[in-house]
Amino acid sequence: MESATTISQELFTTNNLWILISTAFVFIMHLGFACVESGFVQKKNVINIIFKNTMIPAIGLLTYAIMGFNLMYPGADFAGGFFGFAGFGISTDEAGLTSAYNPGYTYWSDFIFQGMFAATCATIVSGAVAERIKLVPFFIFTIIFVMLIYPIIGMWHWGGGWLKVAGFHDFAGSSLVHSVGGWGALAGAIVLGPRIGKFVGNSVRPIPGHSIPLATIGVFLLWFGWYGFNGGSVLSADPALLSLVFVTTSLGAAAGAVTAFFTSYFMFKSYDVSMVLNGILGGLVGITAGADVITPMESIIIGGIAGILIPFSVVFFDKIKIDDPVGATSVHLVCGVWGTLATGIFGEGKSLVSQLIGVGAIGAFAFGTAFLIFYILKVTTGIRVTEDYEERGLDITEHEMEAYKI
Amino acid sequence: MESATTISQELFTTNNLWILISTAFVFIMHLGFACVESGFVQKKNVINIIFKNTMIPAIGLLTYAIMGFNLMYPGADFAGGFFGFAGFGISTDEAGLTSAYNPGYTYWSDFIFQGMFAATCATIVSGAVAERIKLVPFFIFTIIFVMLIYPIIGMWHWGGGWLKVAGFHDFAGSSLVHSVGGWGALAGAIVLGPRIGKFVGNSVRPIPGHSIPLATIGVFLLWFGWYGFNGGSVLSADPALLSLVFVTTSLGAAAGAVTAFFTSYFMFKSYDVSMVLNGILGGLVGITAGADVITPMESIIIGGIAGILIPFSVVFFDKIKIDDPVGATSVHLVCGVWGTLATGIFGEGKSLVSQLIGVGAIGAFAFGTAFLIFYILKVTTGIRVTEDYEERGLDITEHEMEAYKI
Amino acid sequence: MESATTISQELFTTNNLWILISTAFVFIMHLGFACVESGFVQKKNVINIIFKNTMIPAIGLLTYAIMGFNLMYPGADFAGGFFGFAGFGISTDEAGLTSAYNPGYTYWSDFIFQGMFAATCATIVSGAVAERIKLVPFFIFTIIFVMLIYPIIGMWHWGGGWLKVAGFHDFAGSSLVHSVGGWGALAGAIVLGPRIGKFVGNSVRPIPGHSIPLATIGVFLLWFGWYGFNGGSVLSADPALLSLVFVTTSLGAAAGAVTAFFTSYFMFKSYDVSMVLNGILGGLVGITAGADVITPMESIIIGGIAGILIPFSVVFFDKIKIDDPVGATSVHLVCGVWGTLATGIFGEGKSLVSQLIGVGAIGAFAFGTAFLIFYILKVTTGIRVTEDYEERGLDITEHEMEAYKI
Amino acid sequence: MKKIEAIIRSSKFESVKSALSEIGASFFTYKEVKGFGKQATEHVTYRGAEYDLGYIARIHIEIIVANDSAAKVIETIRKAAHTGEIGDGKIIISTIDEILSIRTSKSNESAL
Amino acid sequence: MKKIEAIIRSSKFESVKSALSEIGASFFTYKEVKGFGKQATEHVTYRGAEYDLGYIARIHIEIIVANDSAAKVIETIRKAAHTGEIGDGKIIISTIDEILSIRTSKSNESAL
Amino acid sequence: MKKIEAIIRSSKFESVKSALSEIGASFFTYKEVKGFGKQATEHVTYRGAEYDLGYIARIHIEIIVANDSAAKVIETIRKAAHTGEIGDGKIIISTIDEILSIRTSKSNESAL
Ligand SMILES: Nc1ncnc2c1ncn2[C@@H]1O[C@H](COP(=O)(O)OP(=O)(O)O)[C@@H](O)[C@H]1O
Ligand SMILES: Nc1ncnc2c1ncn2[C@@H]1O[C@H](COP(=O)(O)OP(=O)(O)O)[C@@H](O)[C@H]1O
Ligand SMILES: Nc1ncnc2c1ncn2[C@@H]1O[C@H](COP(=O)(O)OP(=O)(O)O)[C@@H](O)[C@H]1O
């Protein structure tokens, strides 16, 4: 990327346009999450998950405007630090709308692209706690998580904080977005406990999702949106880097599908479409940390290993009786950590030690705070619906509506 | 924007590319409408609404090529006027494909972007008259509305007509597109009368939509498409303005969701997802007139008020016994008018008086002509299906098909 | 397009960006196919078709990386030939990432755009053989078809082979993609035979699809993706040509919808939404070969004739007892051939004779090889599930899952 | 105790339901069923081939009543479901041995 | 009057339907039900955990006939629904008090 | 032979099913039905207007048993489906003429 002083208005316009188009692509990921999660829950809880996943991006954008953006990007004064804050609200002067702000985007583009990312981590959590969490406590969690926890962790690396200085590399958020959401999902699933009837004695009773077509639409929309998620993270339309990122992203997803297919076939002797769908997502999450620093061949390896991890991880969480209806922890946490480490292994000039430090610090902070929030909510407002509500479903009991009249 | 003579081929290429990408985004709004409307009708009328919403963009594009485009943009000879026409068909010379035509787009881009908008207003109507209108009269209405009424009104402002001169400002069509559709929806709903069983004595019997997931997909696709609808209306890829428009559009939608959530909770004591979905659309419609001339903070206020208007408006139309199965009048008419007025209140250098003139003139003409067309159709061909057809549903009776075999 | 040596970095960046965005658009077509095909099959075979259509793009991308790309674009050494190969795998030097490679895109962009196309032809086949083919043999067919047959045919024209020299013109793949898939579909449907109960004596028993809304979502997503399919095939963001292609593509689809509506109404006296949906696809396929060399008016004619062909073709294949559950042969084969010939009729400077040669050669090779592969699979592994499996549905028998719990 | 089964037009369900509740018989069970009868089934088209949908969508109501209220319930259903057009449906009456309330363990009249 | 209920394989519905219409018994009501029996239910997997689907999808046919045609109808259904494999289903015959036509108010034989 | 019909809460289906299989009565047929009764139906809201969903989702179990096992089966269902809250449902017992196995052509006890 040329320096800000020399970039032509033409290149600036193209770069900025790409960031905005990427924003729209990332937006569609929220629909992707809504479809995946509602497809994988029971018919009686569909309205509930849709309600959450519709409110989350709205909440995410507004809280990011209020303070998230300025927590995550507090400016050079806080470089290398753990925490910084540049004040409430968003605003800019004329210069913020030119390449003087950044050769890749205006201030507004910067805000809206980052803001669209912000809500993603809360959406990840909503899948893991589905079918049994109370609505209001969940929204309280969401607001705190999106407004404070996510931006603070983001600041450590993307905001120029201590992880940046420590040589940590997370291109588009295997750790900063996905594993943060995944840790929150794990914390929520633990504090809440499993759905009634999921674990009976030592056996696991599957509770199949109500619509695989809906889940499939969601996975494809996520893959589509990922071109903006990873592609936009190039922060310009630089042809060489952007085209590499498209290739690594695509091949990572493809490899995840294929290895999840084979692995689940060998493990379960069936062609399990839910595993393939999760394999794609695992491949995408896995590739996200290093999409800019690895070769296409390496992206196949990283995505392929992510696809292998998925079925093992799903079985593992079932075994330790953590009930995650949509597989959010397997996809976002396990593959997010894997992708971050893989960047240390394969990425040129990247250090596995730095990556380990990042994974550890982020995990400790994200899991710790999420656990704390959920726990405090549990002992104050309560976080779990009554048994009666859970059996009749949250749609009728919390929303007084039914998802389908078919 | 630089003047046509000085713009570089590079900027012209980028600008034009954005207009075309916006066209594709606006196209996907037609799928959004199809999903919202089919999700909110009963299972027995799904094919019917899909049939309409599939034919409408096709009809819209073709009639716009035949005469709509040249009615809406008749050229400088008709500047400041009420009506103009530049002849049938579309064609251009070499110059029309360069920046000599416009620094932002070629003649073909101009046509296809505007043409994709055109059908939107008819789609809005189809939701309000759903579940009881006859197919052929509806198509006759659609053709007249899209081929004549919409372009004539559009010419008043965007085509350089009298409203332009009068200082009216409607950036991307809160009035020109959405309220025009909304007025048509209102006229149709009045002339048709309510569905059987909707109003019994003084009580309102809700007729729930058959699939909330489908409606949700629709709303998210509309939000996605709105980035092209508003973003493309910048008519170039100008970084400062385009990024502002993305921010105001996003925050308006988010604010609409949040305020519709609270308002409907206080009004109905339930977490009503259909209100939140309509709140998002209301916020988007509200922000559309002034997305280029307001600040992000103002966009939150405008979208937020739109979200508050939605539940009140839905209840109001129920009270006066106007039956609008999908809430098209609340979303497009009420919030369209609100957005246009809000531009006069908040927009720098905009006049509330000019906005009121525009709202009044557009309302009178759109509602008057739509009412007339529906009324003439009612007394000639008839516009309402028989009671028997309505009870058995339009899918079996008019289309001889069922939407689902589940 | 300027020559590689003179193009500015600005234009190169914009061109390359468009190719990558087009890649994402083409990707979404895979979701479109998944939705159309799953919507048009019975409820009991939904998982099966989704499984296939999810694996196909993954397989397509990986095999294209392994050898497809280098078979299809073997380089100048093989110019004018029938077959060439540039070795396994993909890789590039620094120059491949600059405009020295091509003024429109980098090497990576070239690969990923072409790779996203590759799987399309196998997806087309999956619809025609749905509800009765065994999974593993289908995947074997897919791999051979995508890895060998499609790239070899592609090389003849787009790879600079003998059809290129012969003056054949197929802009974005009416023949090279759609008819190739259509021929494979025909071969598969013939070798497999019809579904049980489809043809009883001389009468045709329709087997309605399980969800028209799902099929509709698919068709709209395909139309959306087509802007990348045809638009990306401009191979740059050239304003004049790209905007023409958007117009011809849009009008072709619109005309197909309208004529399919009228034709099917006159033939069957019903408003058949499945015909309108197929008419849109037929219009799009028809326009694809000549989208760059015809006028908008001609695009209406070509798309309109495609829309007329659809209902006749559907009835014809039923009459000769070829069972194609989703109408893939009518849409992709019949309209693909029509579009290729239409380019010879309408396209300036194009020759109908060259087009006929191309259609014949491609048909002979694609149908011949596909038939052979299916036939060999039939006599070795077997390609058809047992009667019992077919009656109970492939979801329960092959996948041990159900698509819906509604 | 009598079991009364009524197979009625789906479109008449609301009026049967309110007629029953007017005479105080507001406890019953129903389900959607598909019926063949003299009424021609819906004639539909799919991709150019015509066929019969093969059934008419109907509602099947099941209501258990004491012997002496049976006549009234039957007449109420008959009136409310009647249109006079082919396809009105049937009412089937049979005698049951016993009805038992799961909640109270009471049976027959006292189970209702 | 007899009520004949047949619980058959979904895949045998078409052949039972046409067999019945051949003997002129083309008026009946049916619905989809789920059955447990000796036939093992479908064995399925979801996200790596195996389980039984818990039921077999079946069709439940209800047909009211005059006493003297009962034997023929029963035999027709039995033959058309028979495969010999476990899971063929059952036919249940019971006596009803009366069947009433909603349209004509006629009862029993004349209601059919 | 007795036909036992039980109309139970959907949420009690699993426990009834296992209770039945414990006493060896693991052959039966069930379907989803909608019930009206003393239990108030779900109160819902749609777009600001409140209304009653108009029914409670229930499971209807049908099981044919020999006369002497009827009492045990009835008691088993009653216990497993019991909560004591309004809405527990009913068990309906009636006498059938015959049950016939489609596969074996055997009838009554030997058809089970
Ligand atoms: N013999 C029968 N056994 C069971 N159900 C029947 C019988 N005859 C009619 N029905 C049911 O009653 C419905 C109406 O019967 P139909 O002959 O169409 O009209 P009508 O009752 O007016 O004579 C049928 O669709 C079917 O569901
Ligand atoms: N005692 C019973 N009561 C009610 N339905 C039964 C009974 N026994 C069997 N059925 C029904 O009949 C179906 C077939 O029974 P099954 O034992 O599997 O095979 P078969 O009839 O060949 O012996 C079951 O799925 C169930 O729906
Ligand atoms: N007379 C009846 N005939 C048929 N079904 C009945 C009758 N009474 C009750 N039911 C069924 O039993 C269910 C439970 O009855 P309800 O009165 O709500 O509670 P309870 O059985 O505890 O008294 C109802 O929803 C309905 O399906």
Image (cartoon, coloured by chain):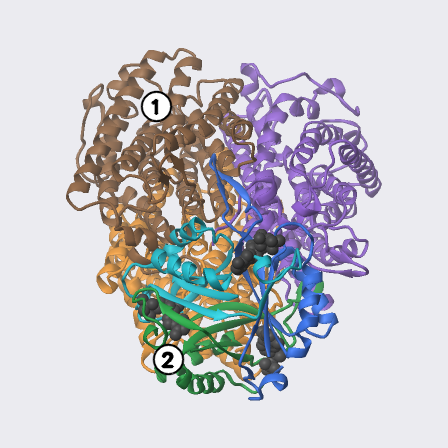
Chain colours: A brown, B orange, C purple, D green, E blue, F cyan
Give the residue type that dot 2 points to. Ala
Of all chains, the one bearing label 2 is D
Does residue C211 appear anywhere in the picture? no
- Residue C94 in percent (x, y) is at 53, 15
Quarter of the rendering containing residue F47 = bottom left
Classify 10 Å Cα crowding around label 2: few (below 14), some (14-19), many (20 and above). Answer: many
**The one of B266 and D18 positioned closer to us in this rendering:** D18
State the residue at coordinates (71%, 66%): E18
When the figure is inspected, residue D76 is found, relative to residue A148, above or below; the finding is: below
Classify 10 Å Cα crowding around label 1: few (below 14), some (14-19), many (20 and above). Answer: few
- Mark 2: C-beta under 8 Å from nearest atom of ligand 3: yes
Marks 2 and 1: which is nearer the front? 2
Of all chains, the one bearing label 1 is A
Give the residue type that dot 1 points to. Thr
Quarter of the rendering containing residue A380 = top left
Quarter of the rendering containing residue C59 = top right
**Residue bearing mark 2:** D25
State the residue at coordinates (38%, 33%): A318
**The one of E35 and A26 positioned closer to us in this rendering:** E35
Tag 1 secondary structure? loop
Query: Mark 2 and mark 1: span between their CA atoms?
Result: 84 Å
- Residue D54 in percent (x, y) is at 65, 67
Tag 2 secondary structure? loop
- Residue B52 in percent (x, y) is at 55, 64
In the rendered structure, the answer to whether residue B28 lies left or right of residue F42 reads right
In the drawing, what numbered circle is on residue C181?
A: none
Q: Quadrant of ligand 2?
A: bottom right
**Residue bearing mark 1:** A5
**The one of C396 and C126 positioned closer to us in this rendering:** C396
Discs 2, 1 touching: Cβ within 8 Å: no
State the residue at coordinates (32%, 65%): F87
